[in-house]
DNA sequence: GTATGGATTGTC
DNA sequence: ACAATCCATACT
């Protein structure tokens, strides 16, 4: 399957956020791999967005990767417990990224189940299955994404995206989640998800 | 050095 | 409704 190239990410952040829906996220580690379908995203645009870590192009050790070239991973720890995965967008010098808020498991699901619940997939109940990857922290746990992935090239060979299947999907647009502090930016319609997909965050 | 709070989740 | 849990950031 064709990989998304760096040029895909070198564009308007909200266009990238919308178009990432339905794409497949591939992670290779050793002889194992996982595939999941992106079903929910949010755009963050440092130059104008009070919800972004890099608001007003604030450059710190943490936000540095967002100022670099597009197609790299920005991974940060939230609430002292969970990691969140973003893909850097727009040209180097801009500080913008797309937060991957939810994915649908496709392959390597046994590993996801173990990482998330220390149980095999057949031991999971209905609720646990629907909670495998239905949130930004959940999907990082399931996919084994951590601080070591920060700054990784997502156009390389160990973590990358493909065009996936060409299934139709309807895109829903909404306000972003859990950014109550962001004043006027709380109302920006920069969250996108696939309508009726069961793995969209709750 | 100290203080503050968060792009979340699971449980109560 | 709220605790868990800790690091990045801002301030002294």
Image: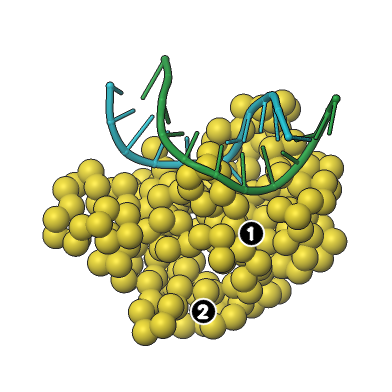
Chain colours: A yellow, B cyan, C green
| Subunit that carries the residue with mark 1 | A
Q: Nearer the viewer, residue A31 or A51?
A: A31
Q: For the residue labelled by badge 2, is the local secondary structure a helix, a strand or a loop?
A: loop
Q: Nearer the viewer, residue A118 or A7?
A: A118
Is disc 1 placed on a helix, strand or loop?
A: strand
Residue at 51%, 79% (x, y): give it. Answer: A158
Percent position of residue A23, x then y:
49, 66
Quarter residue A30 falls in: bottom left
Q: CA distance from mark 2 to mark 1?
A: 15 Å
Q: Which residue, given by chain and number where applicable, does mark 1 sit on?
A: A74
Which residue is at 45% across, 73% downward? A27
Give how far across and how far down residue A83 sits, in percent. Answer: 51, 52
Q: In the rendered image of this protein, does residue C3 appear above or below residue A29? A: above
Q: Earlier in the sequence, mark 2 or mark 1?
A: 1
Residue A84 is labelled as none
Left or right relative to A127: residue A66: right
**Which residue sits at x=23%, y=43%?**
A127
Q: Is residue A42 left or right of residue A139?
A: right
Q: Quadrant of the C terminus of chain A?
A: top left
Asked if one can make out residue A187 in the rendered structure from this viewpoint, the answer is no
Q: Is residue A123 visible?
A: yes
Q: Position of residue A119 (x, y in %)?
A: 20, 57
- Furthest-left residue in view? A122
| Quarter location, residue A56 | top right
For the residue carrying disc 1, how many other residues have a C-alpha within 10 Å: few (<14), some (14-19), or many (20+)? many
User: Mark 2 = which residue?
Assistant: A158
Which residue is pictured at 25% across the width and 57% down the height? A118
Label 2 marks which chain's residue? A
* Count of numbered circles on the image: 2
**CA neighbours of label 2 inside 10 A, class few (<14), some (14 to 19), many (20+):** some
């Amino acid at each position: 399957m064709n990989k998304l190239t760096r040029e895909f990410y070198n564009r308007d952040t909200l266009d990238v956020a919308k178009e990432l829906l339905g794409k497949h996220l591939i992670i290779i580690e050793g002889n194992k791999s996982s595939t999941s379908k992106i079903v929910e995203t949010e755009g963050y645009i440092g130059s104008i967005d009070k919800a972004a870590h890099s608001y007003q192009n604030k450059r710190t050790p943490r936000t540095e990767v967002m100022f670099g070239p597009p197609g790299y991973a920005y991974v940060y720890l939230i609430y002292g417990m969970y990691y969140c995965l973003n893909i850097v967008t727009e040209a180097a010098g801009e500080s913008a990224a797309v937060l991957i808020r939810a994915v649908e498991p496709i392959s390597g699901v046994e590993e996801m189940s173990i990482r998330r619940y220390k149980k095999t997939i057949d031991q999971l109940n209905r609720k646990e299955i629907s909670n495998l990857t239905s949130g930004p922290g959940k999907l990082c746990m399931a996919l084994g994404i951590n601080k070591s992935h920060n700054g990784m090239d997502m156009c390389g060979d160990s973590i990358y995206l493909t065009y996936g299947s060409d299934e139709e999907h309807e895109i829903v647009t909404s306000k972003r989640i859990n950014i109550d502090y962001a004043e006027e930016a709380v109302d920006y319609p920069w969250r996108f998800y696939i309508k009726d997909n069961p793995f969209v965050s709750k």
